[in-house]
Image (cartoon, rainbow, N blue to C red):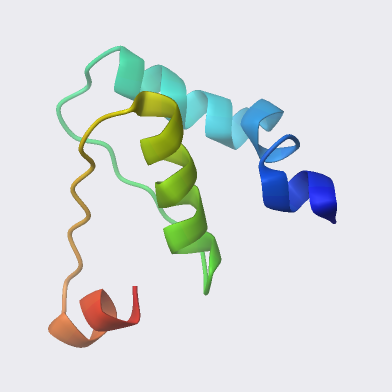
Amino acid sequence: MRKIVTGKTIKVAEPFQNLLGKINQAEKKINVGGLVGAARPFWTALLANILEGTILVVCPEEKEAVAF
């Protein structure tokens, strides 16, 4: 579990690498789905840490943004 929490396992996971690839290719629109619960802010924080930049998260409803 510790490897997952520190991001060592996630950083090499294919979906995470695919997302990083799209970001690094400067795709204008990237949709991310399938993440539930704490995985959403966790992946976002991990991305922010790796990319060292600003990340914009858009939620369809205010209640979802608050929950995020």
| Relative to 32, residue 60 above or below | below
| Relative to 32, residue 22 above or below | above
- Is 61 displayed left or right of 3 in the figure? left
Q: Quarter of the image containing the C terminus?
A: bottom left
Picture mark count: 0
Q: Quadrant of residue 33?
A: bottom left
- Is 11 displayed left or right of 41 in the figure? right
Q: Residue furthest top?
A: 25
The reply to whether residue 34 is visible in this rendering is no
The x and y percentages for residue 29 are 18, 34
Query: In front: 52, or 25?
Result: 52
The x and y percentages for residue 19 are 44, 31
Q: Residue at x 45, y 61 (%)?
A: 40
- Is 41 displayed left or right of 28 in the figure? right
Query: In front: 67, or 19?
Result: 67
Q: Residue furthest bottom?
A: 63
- Is 10 displayed left or right of 56 in the figure? right
Q: Residue at x 43, y 18 (%)?
A: 21
Q: Residue at x 36, y 38 (%)?
A: 48
| Relative to 62, residue 26 above or below | above
Q: Residue furthest right?
A: 1
The x and y percentages for residue 54 are 20, 37
Q: Residue at x 22, y 22 (%)?
A: 27
Query: In front: 30, or 1?
Result: 1
Q: Quadrant of residue 49?
A: top left
| Relative to 60, residue 18 above or below | above
The x and y percentages for residue 9 are 75, 37
